[in-house]
Image (spheres, rainbow, N blue to C red):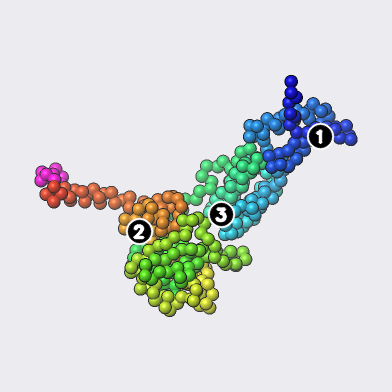
Amino acid sequence: MAKRRQFGKVRQLPSGRFQASFIDPSGQRQNAPDTFTRKADASRWLALVEADLSRGTWLDDRAGSITLGEYARAVLRDSQRIGPRWRETCERNMRLHLVPLLDMPLRAVSAMRVREWHAAALRGKGGKTSISQTYRFLRMVMNTAVRENVIARNPCQIPGAGVVKAAERPVATPAQILALVDAITPRYRTAVLIAAWCGLRRGEIAGLLTEDVDLTAHTITVRKNRIELLATRKAFDADPKTAAGKRTVSIPPHVMPIVRLHLEEHAGKERLFISRDGSPLRGNTLYQAFVRARRAAGLDEFTIHDMRHTGQTLAAQAGATMADLMKRLGHASMAAAKRYLHAVDGRDAEIAKALSDLASHGDAARLPKRIVVGA
């Protein structure tokens, strides 16, 4: 009978004890955490490891001993899916909220410890939004640890902990949009109009170039998103998060005259929006100008992001489909677009009334005259 190939390796140390080792899935040799008095015990440990590997339940003992803080910082450093703004936010939230867990070995972060940490954080002075962001980041780090065979199960099991239900934002009327445009510094009027009627984000507006505006086709193309880091005050243009973020949006005809005027009087040589000193427009500069304008117009309930929200809601009311809204929003999923379609949900009663109006004029619809409203 052929001899079964042995998994791993057992060797006797000068002390007389036995050391077991094996090659892990990454190709690295790992030693058992302890040595053994008998060779049979070392072989038995290797058999258990081999069984765990075959079942897909093996955990990396070396990686599991590092602290949560070390592992979380490594995930932040290495993940290609984390953008610079979110990385900065996670680093700040780690300092603000995750300190009680950071020095714990990764394997020691249990579901109970996460629950206790989260409850204590909510009792503290931190904002619910940043605590929710911190929990989502912790959950992502632990999901990575599960994939990398460091832990067996994600300990972040609190229902709804990573979700913050945002308050319903106000929708501006066309008259209110006009009041804000009239009140803001002239060089930023077009920015408000593009936010309100084209649905661009503040970073997308700040990242626009003059060549992104097509005066013939009446379109504006989003190619870049302006990123600003609070800690270092660095600013740079980056690609949108998803391919859907790069898009061309039609400009409503009533906005075009203001866009043309802006190109003539306020645009830079390359960038569509610039500050007074000619430098690229900073998002905070636009924000502060908008705050002054809303105060002057008596519309303090609105934020600059509400203009984007307004534009998409009005587009939904104008008959935009889910696909239309996704394109204008620059979203790859339907989740965001659904928020705006709720604006037309209440029109069902209007549709029913219109159907009755149609029925009351049956001859026009080739319906029997006896169909009468209220019959």
**Residue located at (73% from left, 26% from top):** 4
**Residue located at (37% from left, 52% from top):** 322
Secondary structure of residue under mark 1: strand
Residue contact at pointers 2 and 3, CB within 8 angstroms: no
Q: Nearer the viewer, residue 302 or 1?
A: 1
The number of numbered discs placed on residues in the rendered structure image is 3
The residues colored magenta run 367-375
Compared across the picture, whether 333 is left or right of 365 comes to right
- As drawn, the residue found furthest toward the left would be 369
Compared across the picture, whether 87 is left or right of 207 comes to right
Secondary structure of residue under mark 2: helix
Q: Is residue 134 above or below residue 4?
A: below
Disc number at residue 315?
2
**Residue located at (15% from left, 45% from top):** 374
| Residue 251 quadrant | bottom left
Q: Position of residue 292 (x, y in %)?
A: 46, 71
Disc number at residue 19?
1
The amino acid at mark 2 is Ala
Indicate which label's residue lies in the foreground, 2 or 1.
1
Which residue bears the numbered disc 3?
Answer: 130
The Cα–Cα distance between marks 2 and 3, rounded to whole angstroms, is 31 Å
Earlier in the chain: of badge 2 and badge 1, it is 1
The amino acid at mark 3 is Ser
Residue contact at pointers 2 and 1, CB within 8 angstroms: no
Indicate which label's residue lies in the foreground, 2 or 3.
2
Earlier in the chain: of badge 3 and badge 1, it is 1
The amino acid at mark 1 is Gln
Quarter of the picture holding the N terminus: top right
The Cα–Cα distance between marks 2 and 1, rounded to whole angstroms, is 70 Å
Compared across the picture, whether 175 is left or right of 227 comes to left
The majority secondary structure of the magenta stretch comes to: loop
